[in-house]
Amino acid sequence: MDDPQPRTLAHLRHPADGEMTMLYECTLQRNCSLTPRQVARAYAVLCTMSLGVAIAFFVHGIWIVLAFSLLELACVGLALLLYARHALDRERIALTASCLLVECVQAEVRSQARLDPLWTRVLPPADGRFSAGARRGLITLESRGVRIEVGRFVNETKRRQVARELRQALRQISIIP
Amino acid sequence: MSTTAGSPDYVHGEGQVHGHPHGWRRWLYATNHKDIGTLYLWFSALMLVEGGVLAMLIRLELFRPGLQFFRPELYNEFVSLHGLVMVFGAIMPAFVGFANWMVPLQVGASDMAFARMNNFSFWLLPPAALLLTASFFVPGGATGSGWTMYPPLSLQMGVGMDMTIFAIHLMGASSIMGSINIITTILNMRAPGMTLMKMPMFCWTWLITAYLLIAVMPVLATAVTMLLTDRHFGTTFFNAAGGGDPVMFQHVFWFFGHPEVYIMILPGFGIISEVIPAFSRKPLFGYASMVYATASIAIISFIVWAHHMFTTGMPITAQLFFMYATMLVAVPTGVKVFNWVATMWKGSLTFEPAMLFAVGFLWVFTIGGFSGLILSLAPVDIQLQDTYYVVGHFHYVLVAGSLFCLFSGYYFWVPKWTGNMVNDWRAKFHFWNSLVWVNVTFFPMHFLGLAGMPRRYADYAVQFTDFHMITSIGAWLFGLSQVYWLLFIVIPNIRGGPPAPPRPWEGAEGLEWTIPSPAPWHTFDTPPMVK
């Protein structure tokens, strides 16, 4: 899990005047110190060691080492794959005057939702008692009957912080003339 | 070594969860790395007691020449189970326990990568221990073929041998799962900014050990599976009558067995590399060379296995190769020893119990290392093979080496585990007794070996009596010192004691010292930044 970042009020393109004011933006993702490519390299080193030993025994007629080695490396590979598949999982919340964009990437599957910021309410983890996400302590965003849960990659303290900041940013919109 | 940009702020109650399971469910369903670490440590302490009791019985029998208490077959069972219990039940799980407790705290991770697999890998151990222990009570008794399980003797044992084979399979599976968890945690879950070359040495040594474990465990599984099929399924891999070769078992076993020796000492090197800088108030001398030396030891461990079998007959060129390769181990090991000494050089040294054990380790492990160097010489080894010289050597490495590392690590990190400081006087009493009696026990074994006393004998010629008596007295007092540790240090420390601050040792560096003592239930939910 990571600190929600970056949180900016940077200027982006706007359909009307060529620039769109980004009122709030944050990316929520878990901490992963190696990219999947680097993990693959570490796994290759491990396979080289283990298979090197196993093939040497195989050449000398003791094939069972290779069988055990393959079984074991399959388990390690599966474990690393499971971890790597979700290593780049993240959620991105971006708020402009006209759109609240919630983007979620899980196991390389990207889903996106665009909510109307004027009609969006933010239910912090403890408030949304009736949603499944709230039971898991997630932030629930509700807009015109659409319900989206965010914050699955950060801890509760950070979720509350994000919920507070997002509410504040949404309030800013309502006072924009 | 790494430093943190800022310690995480633990406000009142944060990090402690009130809804976590209590009672037996907390331990049976444990997924928290600290709980699982505690389970591993208690398991290994229990196994240490079991292996220790067996050692005391062995020394009781050997106190005087002649058969006093046990049949030679039962004596052989004691010797075999003592080795198996200590290697697979006590030392290896103890280091895994340390890894479970400390690796996530040192890399700034919230837990191990696969928490449920972590639970499973621990809970494979008690059934394995039960199988080993229960094998004493089945017809034919436990295996008497030594921890090495050499055929043809192991092919002739009763059902106790099968129980041992299954126990080893279970413990091997547990070790593999533990290694997968450690590799994934260290590679993927390090705090932002903690590059590999900023990692604490304990994590480095465990990462290399886990790679080593993954590489050699299939070889152990193969050796014991082939034994099993020879015993029950009509194969003759190791049966000369059927065209097999018992010596092949030795090659397969020691291809696992020698790296196993390093599996039992490398994490200990990591502990010493944490303790010495802390109490020298200096960074570790030659950090990068320490990492490379550890990796070199691991790599060389693959090409030295046949030095355990010089007397089985091999070409002279092979003898020379294994002799020189074995000598080569002294180079990276020497780098480590010199780096530890250089770390202490001109340091502001204080001798708290953890440091005492670390310095004690340096001395006694070096003795074990040098006797290993002597044994690496093929002509000398042929004279000393299977004598008490070898027993003395590997006990210096494993008891005075690995066990002293574990004690050093215990005294270093126990304030973080229990939140209480250890009674200094008692800990020092434990150290001095351990240091004196370990030498009284194992040093005379070298003289016994040089005089020709063979190992794994329940009886001996009368000229060996004096040294055996000294060894037995030393062993009992060493054993009592460990009972003292368990009853008068470990248990009182869990029950209470002076509260430990987050960083009880002035010179200690690393993420684990930025959190309160005892470590809260949840730590590093948000990874810290490392500079």
Image (cartoon, coloured by chain):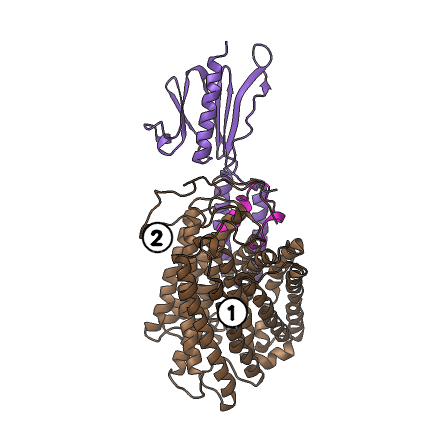
Chain colours: A purple, B brown
- Which range is magenta? B179-202
The x, y position of residue B322, in whole percent, is: 64, 70
Q: Is residue B187 above or below residue B458?
A: above
Q: Residue at x 67, y 63 (%)?
A: B338
Q: Is residue B278 above or below residue A111?
A: below
Crowding around mark 1 (Cα neighbors within 10 Å: few <14, some 14 to 19, many 20+) is many
Sequence-wise first label, 2 or 1? 2
Query: Callout 2, which amino acid?
Result: Leu
**Secondary element at tag 1:** helix
Residue B67 sits in quarter: bottom left
**Secondary element at tag 2:** helix
Q: Nearer the viewer, residue A109 or B526?
A: B526
Q: Main secondary structure of the magenta part?
A: helix
Residue under label 2 = B28
Q: Nearer the viewer, residue B79 or B44?
A: B44
Q: Is residue A124 left or right of residue B278?
A: left
The x, y position of residue A60, in whole percent, is: 56, 64
- Whether residue B337 is visible: yes
Nearer to us: label 2 or label 1 = 1
Residue under label 1 = B399
Do the dots labelled 2 and 1 sit on one chain?
yes
The x, y position of residue B514, in whole percent, is: 52, 46
Query: Callout 1, which amino acid?
Result: Val
**Residue B198 drawn in magenta:** yes
- Whether residue B165 is visible: no
**Residue B417 drawn in magenta:** no
Q: Which mark is residue B503?
A: none
User: Distance between the Cα atoms at labels 2 and 1?
Assistant: 31 Å
Q: Residue at x 54, y 61 (%)?
A: B352
Chain ID at mark 1 = B
Q: Residue at x 52, y 73 (%)?
A: B438
